[in-house]
Image (cartoon, helix red, strand yellow):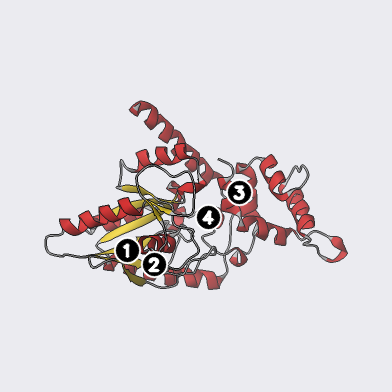
Amino acid sequence: MRKRMKEKMRKVEAFAEKNRAEGTEEVKCTPKDGKMMRAYASEVRKTIEMADVIIEVLDARDPLGSRCEAIEKSVLDAGKRVVFVLNKIDLVPKENVKSWLAYLRTQMPTIAFKASTQEQNQKLGTVIGTALPEGGSKCFGAELLMKLLANYCRNKNIKTSIRVGVIGYPNVGKSSIINSLKRKRACNVGALSGITRRVQEVELDKHIRLIDSPGIVLAIKNRLDATEVALKNAIRIENIEDPVAPVQAILRRCRHETLMMHYMVSEFGSCEEFLALVARKLGRLKKGARPDLRAAARHVSLFGCVHLSACY
């Protein structure tokens, strides 16, 4: 059993590495976007310095691509704890979630999580128990995460309370997790990156304070794959100078039939042909009824993570 699990996770890592290697197109961002990301990075460093425990939020659709081992090492070297929260588990098959939990738990404590999607501002619901949920809008994983953090409070001989920093890529659901734990809308959330712009503290109870931080790309600069960043919606699509590169990566990974059904377009043979069909379908046309390929590319790139999750 253990041998099969190791072999399965080896294949998962090889697949992730292959995807990173394939995403070699250059995606350039505007100077304004780069300046904003540097400011956010400063806020994240502040979060790590202030916290006793760091929660690194991972996207269940791409756990390896949404973590940063260099930051984890710096936190551990400082004598602090790291906890993985595998969020958005409702967007991938249960078997994938179980495999990732088995793999990640060999490295750090890992909690499977689904943030609440309920619309009310107070008394957000939560699912009790450890069995992975079938669906629904209530939060899953909060009970286990609260127990783990409570244990960390008791393990501190000097301090009776702890500060817990929440870090991760943009759009992995950091603020949604905090709202789910608090069971109320304490932090603003949204589908676009950049909703959280500076560090904000939320008192969970008298022993635990959560520190929400802006989402940044947690990657070493010379290993940064800009196409992967764009597909994760980690940078706003309107700030990408060439939105076609992420679309090319989507076409490499997704079955053409899936995209044809989603956009209700006919069969295509190339990226340019696909974008032309999408542009006409959306009514994005230039003078002379020529399809606006860049506008179509921005639209497709905006839903990059949705397309990739549909490819499981």
Q: Amino acid at mark 1?
A: Gly
Residue closer to the observer: 201 or 12 = 201
In the rendered structure, which disc, 2 or 1, sits on the residue that comes first in sequence?
1
Q: Which residue in the structure is indicated by mark 2?
A: 213
Q: Residue at x 41, y 37 (%)?
A: 99
Q: On the rendered image, what quadrant is the N terminus found in? A: top left
User: Most extreme residue toward the left, as rendered?
Assistant: 157
In the rendered structure, which disc, 4 or 2, sits on the residue that comes first in sequence?
2
Q: Which residue in the structure is indicated by mark 1?
A: 165
Q: Is residue 18 visible?
A: yes
Q: Which mark is residue 142?
A: none
How busy is the neighbourhood of tag 3: few (under 14 within 10 Å), some, or many (20 plus)? Answer: many
In 3D space, how far apart are the residues under numbered discs 3 and 4 (Cα atoms)? 11 Å
Q: How many marks?
A: 4
Q: Which mark is residue 232?
A: 4
User: Most extreme residue toward the right, as rendered?
Assistant: 288
Q: Are marks 4 and 1 in contact (CB under 8 Å)?
A: no
In 3D space, how far apart are the residues under numbered discs 4 and 1 (Cα atoms)? 22 Å
Q: On the rendered image, what quadrant is the C terminus found in? A: top right
Image position, residue 133 (x, y; %): 44, 45
Quadrant of residue 231 in the image?
bottom right
Quadrant of residue 299 in the image?
bottom right
Q: Which residue in the structure is indicated by mark 3?
A: 307
Q: Give the secondary structure at mark 1.
A: strand
Image position, residue 203 (x, y; %): 30, 69
Q: Amino acid at mark 2?
A: Ser
In the rendered structure, which disc, 3 or 1, sits on the residue that comes first in sequence?
1
Residue closer to the observer: 108 or 10 = 108
Residue closer to the observer: 196 or 129 = 129
